[in-house]
Image: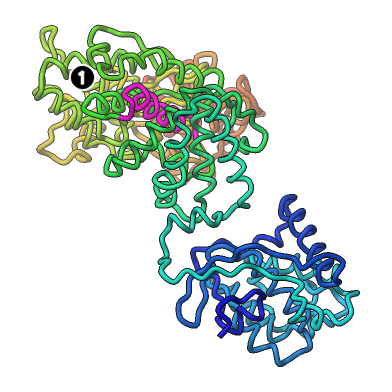
Amino acid sequence: MNTNPETLLELLNEYSIEIPVVQRDYAQGRIDDDASMVRNILLSDMKAAILRETAPLDLNFVYGKDEGSKFIPIDGQQRLTTLFLLHLYAFCDDDSKTELLNRFSYRTRTSSRRFLECLVENRAGVISSEQAPSEEIMDSEWFASNWKYDPTVQSVFVMLDEMHTVFSDVNNLAARLTDDEYKPIVFKFLEMKNLGMEDSLYIKLNARGKPLTHFENFKARLIGRLADVLPDLTVQFENRFDVAWSDLFWSKGHSRFDQTYLDFFGILLMNSGILRSDANWANTFDFNRIQEKDFKIALYTLDYLCNNSENKIVQDFIFTPLLEDRRTYPQRVLFHAVTTYLYNSEGAGDKSFDDWLRVIKNLTTNHRIDEYDKAYRPAIEGINKIAGYWDCLLDYLAKDGAISGFNQEQVREEQQKAKIIIADKDFATAIYEAEKHQYFTGQIRSALYYAVEKDAFDLAVFETIWSKISVLFSATRPIHGHTLRRALLALGDYTIPVSDYRTLCVDDPNEGERTPSMKQLFSSRSKIVKLLLDSLSLDDDIDAQLKQVIQSSDIPQTDWRYCFIKLPSLFKSDTMSAAHLRLRNVSGEWIIVRHKASNGYNEGLYEAALCKILAQKNIESWCDGDVGTWADRYLVVDEYRIRYKKGSFVVSDSENGIVHNTTTDKPFSEAVNFLVNTITPNK
């Protein structure tokens, strides 16, 4: 037995080589600039060594684990794979080497393993073809089309094509490659019998998913800057970087370990104001901009995360944005909330940490943060301004302490809640429980302000009102949908203004389209909301009670609310956008805005309602008219055109002009009666 193999064939004679699942895909055949440069230099050096134009090429150490007859590479996977492909190329017509070549296998993907097995069996046809090896492979019957999506297969294509270009003119390549006396390409083999498969060693010896050089360059430059700024901290920081923190990031996802590590520092530096974007920053960034505070923030934060893995909220604030390909400004703000506290507390956490995170989470999730300069940076600066109150934020708020950069109505709510929490333990418990409702995400002021009795907050009233609100909403929407809206309309005009429009309030509590939601309505101290809540009993079926409110309403037909109360189908998407639910009053007449703005085609509310009522009578009609806000909108019924003006339906035809004008306070009933009596006899 050769206890110290130096070449690939010597190693394959001793072991089968198996690239483990934990390793990344073959990367030296990638087409990015770094891989292309490495590949070109490596193949050129290999050729020069084989032709004896240079000394034998030493590929340095190959580390691995001995599992009996199997060798598991830990470091050296890429070089071994390139060597394997070179031998496969050189021995393309030597069947005696087939068994030996089959001792090299990938376990990273089933497709990688099966492809290499088939490639070994069919290598003669691939290499001898007049086509490029990749083209010959893809044209072969044995090649499964779905294999071309495997990153390792893609890299093998590139490497074989370039090997063919570099080595096709080398005579006696196989003999030159296996010259036992000269050995043109060698490596230093290190077998580690007692190694085990510890994650930390894999991390130190091999990159995951991205080229090693990017991450290692980042680390080297980061530690180099640290040595200039805080030399006494360098050894401690680097040791943590390599061991404890690496284990932390590794535990969050093997496949993108390097990228997660980079993203942590990217978000941190962006929040510090050093970066404007945390995308693809590490290769072009001026590391001299990193200051002492930034290193200490990283140190305290990562140490805390390592020691407090059970703190789910903190973990979510940090790792949720790290593990997503696209992170939002609110996620960055919450990230900053954690790091700011830990920096000021030097990595400690107690009850004040919970208070700090709860308040800033409420402020962040109830404020639209969707622009860098106008929302994100002000929110970051707002947190920085109150950083000195990291251990007494509730006391600060209870004294009406200001917080800039966030929705000020939410700030006032936090101030009032702080006063109550400090003064009343039982009330504090009720507030914490109410804030758990996922639809309202900490915004509970409707129940809070409705609970004021004789200039004081009444806990029993608060709990009753909040219980009623809670049963009306799921985590994402009002449970009873348009039934809830119709019940509210039966009690009054609850709509909220949006520029030139009014909205019936959308379901989505995040209000991504800048249209107020039912969440905002129920947090607005609306008298109509209060009337509805007072009418509900938790002991009876809520849906039945809402419908009873609707049925009991006595809204005149001349009130626009009548249309929606009596005709819920008006809410459907073929009439108005569910993402906006907007109306507009144009010259005293209400129109349904089909989308976000009224500059397209829109229907008159009364004309659309009459159309649906006529359909119930089996009378065909459709809304028509010009395009635009100020268009002439009308309903077409047979030869008639019907418009709603100043509380009346005006019926006209092209021959006689106006033929009927409703005059009662029941324009729908009168118009339907006229049309039924006029059109039906003619049918």
**x%, y% of residue 252?**
41, 50
Prevailing SS of the magenta stretch:
helix
**Residue 656 is inside the magenta segment:** no
Other-residue count near label 1 (Cα within 10 Å), few / some / many at <14 / 14–19 / ≥20: many
Residue at 40% across, 20% down: 496
Q: Nearer the viewer, residue 294 or 603?
A: 294
**x%, y% of residue 200?**
43, 54
Residue at 69% across, 61% down: 28
Tell me which colouring the rendered structure shows: rainbow
Q: Residue furthest bottom?
A: 96
**x%, y% of residue 574?**
51, 41
Query: Up-down: is 653 above or below 13?
Result: above
Amino acid type assigned to the residue bearing label 1 in the image = Leu
Q: Identify the magenta region.
A: 328-347
The residue tagged 1 is 448
Q: Is residue 603 visible?
A: no
